[in-house]
Amino acid sequence: MKKTLLLNFSFSYFIKLLYLWVELFNMETKVVLVNENDEVLGTMEKLEAHQKGVLHRAFSVFLFNEKGQMLLQKRAATKYHSPNKWTNTCCSHPMLNETYQDAALRRLREELGIDAEIQPIFHFIYKADVGDGLWEHELDHVFIGSYEGEFQLNPEEVSEIRYITLDDLLQEVSMHPDDFTEWFKIILSEYMSHIKIN
């Protein structure tokens, strides 16, 4: 009797965990659709949103070391768009009812295996053709922070990382623009304009 109850409990617990995992997976594969005032309009599968070019929430993180060098990541070869391209430290999409900052901290852990202190600096809307009939159309909240420490890269997301000075980065982007993601080039330009103003 006790063994039967234990088996029933274990199976029930497993089903609940499986349901929660499916729910979390569904949330992570959807983006939050918004208008230009960041008012939620609903959700949509990420690939569909990129195919249709509809406006959705996103965030971008720029981390620097104590030398003032920016941390870049190279997107994994298995990414469905913009594989093997260099981009900023971390960028992704918040889930429904998740704040931009919480989402950014979550993805830093998931992609790079790190915890860092970050702060918001500005947000803006952009639209970029990322190839193969896909578009990034995002209301993007940009964060900055610093990090000194070890990394545990998620190979499904990131193949390489490196630090680079802003001067060297700008020169490299100018000389080899195809090595970088389309959105990073846009966001980097916005970032440079912002720090000049401030």
Image (cartoon, rainbow, N blue to C red):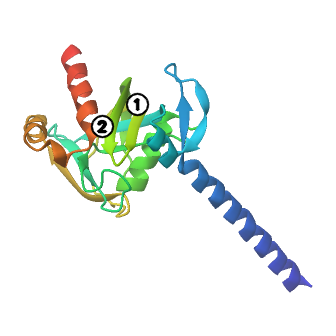
The residue wearing badge 1 is 140
Q: Residue 146: where, in percent of width, then height?
A: 28, 39
Q: In this rendering, is residue 6 above or below 79?
A: below
Which badge, 2 or 1, is on the more N-terminal residue? 1
From the viewer's perspective, is the residue at label 2 or at label 1 nearer? 2
Quarter assignment of residue 79:
bottom left
Residue 183: which disc?
2
Residue 68 appearing in the image: yes
| Camera-nearest residue between 93 and 119 | 93
Which quadrant: the N terminus?
Answer: bottom right
Of helix, strand and loop, which one carries label 2? Answer: helix
User: Element type at marker 1?
Assistant: strand
**Would you say residue 96 is visible in this rendering?**
no
**For residue 145, what is the image quadrant?**
top left
Q: Is residue 169 left or right of residue 11?
A: left
126 sits to left or right of 86: right
